[in-house]
Image (cartoon, helix red, strand yellow):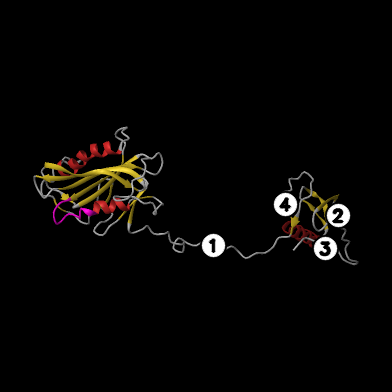
Amino acid sequence: MTTPPGWYRDPSAPHTERWWDGTAWTEHRRTPEAPQHPPPRGSDGSGRAKAVALTAAAAVLVAAIVTGAVVLSEDDGDGDPGAITAPTVSAPASPPPSSSESAPEPSADPDRVVDELNGITLPLLDGWARPENVSDTDVVMTTPGTYDCPGDDGLCRHGTVLSRTVTANDEKSTAALAREDISDAADLAYDRNKVDERPFHGITSHRLVEQGPVAVAGRTGYFVRWRVRTEAGPGGYVQSMAFPSSVGSESLVMVRYVFDAGAEGPPLADMDRITEGIRPVGDEDTSGGVGSDIGPTR
């Protein structure tokens, strides 16, 4: 639908009229002619007043129609003609859906735990749960429930997995980092914790179970595993594993495993199963873990 040719109020000079040829403005302008409306014969002053009022109303109506119908396209008032189109009537846009009608966000994978900071995901095996009521922000999963610690008063868990970025030193060797970390990991878990409690009345001895290189999320790392015996309770197993992150500046990541020994503790094989399932965030096809080929150190 287009505006027919004719004289219309000039958008760049409202007190003049300009010729619209049906597709574009021309350079032809004119001064609007004053309409002549002589009163009908035999009419009195009131008829003249009515005619003037009707004429004024008609002029206002025409101006409103022209103003609404003629739309300039980027006319900056410098005299250049601009294209115009008659306004079209369209159906009102549908209102945006309410929050209750919005498409649901994709749910997180219930079988994996995401550590965005270190750029990895870990498999959530049967018998494990996401951390709840845990003050240590490094904890990424635990065994469900708690029990009364055999030493100092408090609550203990049969299994815990932690993940953190290595920031304490400039050591770049994953083997050196894992060997240094294992002692601290054992002490915090089974000797004296962060709030100066001794839930197992301290460590009486430890022995090296296994150590060596390991592929984690396609990167070469190193792990050290200890068997720890305590004064109270059955003791447990502690493992420290260091490897390069696949995100950012590729900082080194330390994953710690703390498993109680005995029938109540989680299967020791879960350490290997979790390690095998660690993947970079967004890349679930990357291979890695115990038993995988060890590629070149990156």
- Label 1 sits on what residue type? Pro
Marks 2, 4: nearer the viewer: 4
Q: Quadrant of residue 168?
A: top left
Residue at mark 1 to residue at mark 3: CA–CA distance: 47 Å
Q: Nearer the viewer, residue 272 or 212?
A: 212
* Amino acid beneath label 3: Ala
Helix, strand or loop: magenta stretch: loop
In the image, taking residue 89 as reference, residue 238 lies left or right, namely left
For mark 1, what is the residue? 95
Image quadrant assignment for residue 197: top left
When the figure is inspected, residue 80 is found, relative to residue 44, above or below; the finding is: above
Label 2 or label 4, whichever comes before in sequence order: 2
Which residue corresponds to mark 2?
A: 34
Indicate the secondary structure of the residue bearing disc 4: loop
Quarter holding the N terminus?
Answer: bottom right
- Given this view, does label 4 or label 3 mark the residue nearer the observer? 4
Above or below, comparing residue 60 to residue 172 in the picture:
below
Q: Are marks 4 and 1 in contact (CB under 8 Å)?
A: no
> Could you classify mark 2 by the number of other residues whose Cα lies within 10 Å: few (under 14), some (14-19), or many (20 or more)?
few
Residue plotted at (23% across, 50% down): 160
Which residue is located at x 39 percent, y 54 percent?
Answer: 285
Q: Which mark is residue 73?
A: 4
Q: Earlier in the sequence, mark 1 or mark 3?
A: 3
